[in-house]
Image (cartoon, grey):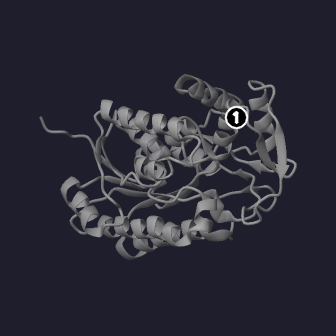
Amino acid sequence: MKNNKEKVLIIGGMGFIGHNLALKLSTKYDVLIVDAMEVNNLISLNKTAKENPNFELYSKIIKQRINLIETNNISLKKIDARNYEKISEVFNNYKPDYVFHLAAVAHANVSNKDPYSTFDHSLRTLENSLDNSRNKNQNIKRFIYLSSSMIYGNFKGGIVDEDTICNPLGIYGALKFSGEKMVIGYNQVFDLPYTIVRPSALYGPRCISRRVIQIFIENAMKNKDIFIDDDGKEKLDFTYIDDFIQGLEKILIHEASNKEIFNLTFGQARSIIDVVNIIKKEFTNLNVISKPRDKLMPIRGTLSIEKAKQKINYLPSFDIEKGIKEYINFYKNIS
């Protein structure tokens, strides 16, 4: 029987965002994941096994990701997206309708310590994805690029929208901003349809990329200290993974998302100390220690989501009270 489902190719699809996206889309689309399993995944985890105190936990999480992909019959090709010939084979054989480019180094601190590797895994993979997407033998309906709130740099006035002038700090933000310009350039030259997405402070089940809320909960469960920057009053627009994935799916549904940039966040920044206090309700003996903040991390705040609400009916529902409760339950069940 012929499969009439539209095809979605997720490059870098076994990471935190990618596997959640694949699971969501697999009920309505034919989904193919391409991932070398190197960045925040099996290979990198095994390389750090001896010095990683969370090795056992993260192994469980990755195995759960793989099991979910397999049980939902989602195709996975273990291919390095930096290999142009291999990626070309995937495009030529699969002929996707939509391409999500997620392949990248996922953390700003890692990027600043190892800029070459960040460039290699971020822009080189993006170039390969874009060049194959614009091929005349393809008929890509949309190329979706995951950027970052880090491209804004320091937030002026505590809130930014998609028209705010970008002034990124450090390697990570600069590369993400460069990626946006590459995507727009391919549209200008080759008429490649695109959507650019800017997330912020993502959190939720099956993450191993050492994000803020993840670190806090893991430390709390082990009765370890939590370290916050300065007085903890700095705010981030924390976004639960289910809300974010809902937004990505709506990009495929709404034609109004073509040639647009969207902030996809909760739309209301909350302080680090707010997060700590919510976690303290579950772990009452939590010890919090202040440390100097990293000067290469921009001072952020709220990302306006009015544009996404209007154009694609984006409706996030997880404030941090609800999201952290769900996240803690995940850890209790998997530990």
Q: Is residue 241 visible?
A: yes
Q: Is residue 270 above or below residue 149?
A: above
Residue 202 point in image, percent of width and height: 60, 45
Q: Is residue 152 above or below residue 186?
A: above
Q: Is residue 167 above or below residue 95?
A: below
Does residue 166 appear to the left or right of 40 in the view shown?
right
Residue drawn at x 33%, y 35% is 28
Foreground of the two, 77 or 139: 77
Residue 91 point in image, percent of width and height: 25, 59
> Which amino acid lies under the numbered mark 1 shown in the image of this protein?
Ile
Residue drawn at x 36%, y 55% is 36
Which image quarter: residue 159? bottom right
Foreground of the two, 161 or 245: 245
Q: Is residue 251 visible?
A: no
Which image quarter: residue 267? top right
Residue 264 point in image, percent of width and height: 59, 48
The C terminus, quarter of image: top right
Describe the element under mark 1 as helix, strand or loop.
helix
Residue drawn at x 47%, y 61% is 259
| Residue placed under numbered mark 1 in the picture | 320
Which image quarter: residue 171? bottom right
Q: Is residue 321 above or below residue 80?
A: above
Residue 276 point in image, percent of width and height: 78, 36
Does residue 125 appear to the left or right of 307 in the view shown?
left
Pick out the residue farthest to the bottom. 189
Residue drawn at x 49%, y 68% is 117
Does residue 206 appear to the left or right of 80 in the view shown?
right
